[in-house]
Image (cartoon, rainbow, N blue to C red):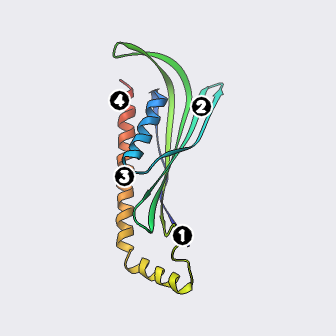
């Protein structure tokens, strides 16, 4: 039976100011791709509301750590109150939006995702014993790596957003 551990549950950060939706999307997807998560867009919804345009994106990715463990990454990006603006940058006029962005991330560690250890009760028992005594340090290192990567992701996106101010 595959075991799912929620490592990061709904950590989010926000930004308000000038936004280029295309470059934010490219930055997030590029960072995940660089970390070998093989990102893909699961959902994309755009709505025009009275307060402005709203865009909801769900970007997912997976990274296999070994034959028995993988990381599932899911980031929900919500652009809200978007108002189109013309901004002069580097001597050229560019179309950008003024609004808010909220990025919420969920990261799960999944072990035995191919369900190779569910053949019978004895093999499952061996799996539980091995997980408890042998792979415990391996799983703890993987969890530490996940926290470190999330911190890098948050810092990269936040610094990119602050660059958009200028």
Instruction: Give the residue at mark 2.
Output: 54
Looking at the rendered structure, the secondary structure element under dot 2 is strand
Q: Residue at x 36, y 52 (%)?
A: 149
Q: Along the polypeptide, which appears first: circle 3 or circle 4?
A: 3
Instruction: Give the residue at mark 3.
Output: 149
x%, y% of residue 87? 43, 16
Select label 3 or label 1 by which is in front.
1
Instruction: Give the residue at mark 1.
Output: 2
Q: Along the polypeptide, which appears first: circle 3 or circle 2?
A: 2
Instruction: Give the residue at mark 4.
Output: 163
x%, y% of residue 52? 60, 25
Q: Along the polypeptide, which appears first: circle 4 or circle 1?
A: 1
Viewer-proximal residue, 65 or 136?
Answer: 65
Q: Residue at x 35, y 58 (%)?
A: 145
Looking at the rendered structure, the secondary structure element under dot 3 is helix
- Spatial separation of the CA atoms under disc 4 and disc 1: 42 Å
- Spatial separation of the CA atoms under disc 3 and disc 4: 21 Å
């Amino acid at each position: 039976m595959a075991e799912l551990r929620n490592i990061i549950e709904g950590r989010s950060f926000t930004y308000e100011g000038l936004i280029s939706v295309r470059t934010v999307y490219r930055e997030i997807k590029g960072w995940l791709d660089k970390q070998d998560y093989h990102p893909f867009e699961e959902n994309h919804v755009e709505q025009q509301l009275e307060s402005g345009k709203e865009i909801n994106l769900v970007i997912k990715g997976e990274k296999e750590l070994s034959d028995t463990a993988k990381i599932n990454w899911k980031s929900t990006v919500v652009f809200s109150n978007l108002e189109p603006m013309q901004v002069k940058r580097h001597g050229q006029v560019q179309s950008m939006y003024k609004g808010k962005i909220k990025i919420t991330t969920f990261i799960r560690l999944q072990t035995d995702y191919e369900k190779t250890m569910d053949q019978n009760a004895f093999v499952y028992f061996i799996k539980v014993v091995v997980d408890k005594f042998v792979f415990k340090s391996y799983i703890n290192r993987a969890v530490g790596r996940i926290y470190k990567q999330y911190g890098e992701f948050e810092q990269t996106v936040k610094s990119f957003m602050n660059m958009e101010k200028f």
